[in-house]
């Protein structure tokens, strides 16, 4: 059972000057595939296993969005673990050897390995055999036996992922998947496509991984909602940002239930089971260009939990975070505190101690 329409609900765009009109416009554009008002256009689609929603403003907005969707399709073909002809599939099929990889994949692997090292393995793209065993790749969900998990765990080891110049590979018996980092990378790649078409204002929403491009046409910051992890619909708070990545990992995004127990899709590479760190969601806010890092970091901190997550932030920095615990606390890092609006009633809000 897919959890509560979990995909594509994160980080909804809020506070547009005329939201009703724009949503009507998005709807019309979806069918006509033409710009429906001068300088404003939208596109919706499905890619990287998630709902994609693009908005752009400016003279060449329509062409920018078409080119961005084409770029996203090209990235998916290259990075998807389930496409037999992808670069990731090539690495997995040739486990034990090095294969040549594109500059994009090199960059993603480099970021992944950095976050793996910094998080002590809480983030590990080689957790894929476990993700698969729990059925999250194919949506044929199941609870693996303890013995099966114990057999698969030795294959989870980011220190055995090799990246040497233009070549990469994993040790025999291993496999990787980029589900926790590729959308963050793609957000920035699509923002570059916007820039190449002269688009300086827009929103790239990849299933809630939001890349806010520039600011609103009127010069105001974008208002990005963080989903309330306890509610099917509803916001925990709003973030005001300009030219930023806003990327959330949450237990509510994908899960299934068996015998009254809920199992979500973020696996603790230590236990081989859905992580149980006491966090309900982690949102990372980082500059444009840092999307892959932000995506990997959101997943890492979700596994690490509140205290270790804040320690990570104090150590490495380069991002701000909103951490929501299972018992209703919302802790934000000081650098983002003055951009938080409309905290929903019921959350215990606090600002973390600085470095
Ligand atoms: P995200 O939504 O960015 O947190 O990514 C979650 C997805 O990344 C899952 O659906 C898995 O495909 C994969 N994944 C699960 N656990 C981990 C982990 N600890 N490290 C890296 N990737 C993971
Ligand atoms: Mg992630």
Image: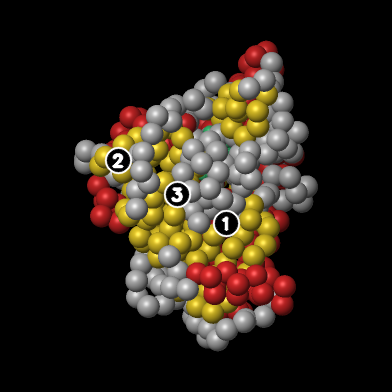
Residue 94 in the figure: left or right of residue 8: right
Residue furthest front as drawn = 345
Residue furthest right as drawn = 84
Q: Residues within 10 Å of mark 3 (few under 14, many from 20)?
A: many
Is residue 203 in view?
yes
Q: Nearer the viewer, residue 162 or 33?
A: 33
Q: Any mark on residue 290, and which?
A: none
Q: Residue at x 43, y 65 (%)?
A: 15
Quarter holding the N terminus is top right
Q: Residue at x 56, y 34 (%)?
A: 266
Q: Residues within 10 Å of mark 2 (few under 14, many from 20)?
A: some
- Residue 187 at what x, y percent from top left? 52, 59
Q: Are discs 2 and 3 less than 8 Å apart at CB?
A: no
Q: Residue at x 35, y 39 (%)?
A: 347
- Residue 30 at what x, y percent from top left? 68, 70
Q: Residue at x 56, y 27 (%)?
A: 274
Residue receiving disc 3: 235
How far is disc 3 from disc 1 in space, using C-alphas?
18 Å
Q: Earlier in the sequence, mark 1 or mark 2?
A: 1
Residue receiving disc 1: 206
- Residue 295 at what x, y percent from top left? 48, 47
Is residue 163 in view?
no
Q: Earlier in the sequence, mark 3 or mark 1?
A: 1
Residue receiving disc 2: 349
- Give the vertical position of 328 relative to 25 (above or below): above
Q: Residues within 10 Å of mark 1 (few under 14, many from 20)?
A: many
């Amino acid at each position: 059972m897919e959890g509560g329409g979990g995909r594509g609900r994160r980080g909804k765009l809020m506070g547009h000057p005329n939201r009703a009109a724009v949503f009507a416009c998005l709807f019309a554009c979806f069918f006509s595939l033409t710009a429906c008002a001068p300088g404003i256009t939208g596109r919706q689609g499905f890619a990287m296993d998630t709902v994609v929603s693009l908005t752009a403003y400016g003279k060449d907005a329509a062409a920018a969005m078409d080119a961005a969707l084409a770029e996203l399709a090209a990235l998916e073909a290259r990075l998807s673990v389930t496409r037999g002809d992808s670069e990731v599939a090539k690495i997995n099929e040739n486990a034990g050897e090095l294969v040549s990889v594109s500059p994009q994949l090199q960059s993603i692997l480099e970021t992944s390995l950095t976050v793996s090292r910094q998080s002590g393995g809480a983030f590990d793209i080689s957790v894929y055999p476990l993700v698969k065993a729990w059925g999250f790749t194919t949506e044929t969900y199941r609870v693996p036996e303890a013995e099966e998990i114990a057999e698969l765990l030795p294959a989870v080891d980011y220190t055995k992922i090799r990246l040497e110049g233009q070549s990469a590979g994993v040790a025999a018996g291993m496999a990787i998947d980029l589900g926790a980092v590729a959308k963050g990378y793609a957000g920035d790649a699509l923002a570059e496509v916007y820039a190449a078409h002269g688009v300086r204002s827009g929103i790239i929403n990849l299933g809630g991984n939001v890349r806010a491009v520039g600011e609103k046409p009127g010069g105001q910051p974008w208002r990005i909602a963080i989903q309330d992890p306890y509610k099917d619909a509803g916001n925990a708070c709003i973030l005001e940002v300009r030219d930023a990545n806003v990327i959330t990992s949450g237990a509510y995004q994908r899960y299934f239930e068996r015998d009254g127990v809920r199992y979500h899709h973020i696996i603790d590479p230590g236990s081989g089971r859905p992580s149980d760190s006491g966090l309900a969601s982690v949102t990372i806010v980082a500059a444009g260009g840092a999307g892959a890092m932000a995506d990997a970091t959101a997943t890492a901190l979700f596994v690490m939990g509140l205290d270790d997550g804040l320690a990570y932030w104090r150590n490495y920095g380069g991002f701000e975070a909103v951490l929501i615990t299972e018992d209703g606390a919302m802790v934000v890092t000081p650098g983002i505190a003055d951009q938080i609006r409309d905290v929903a009633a019921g959350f215990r809000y606090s600002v973390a101690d600085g470095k």
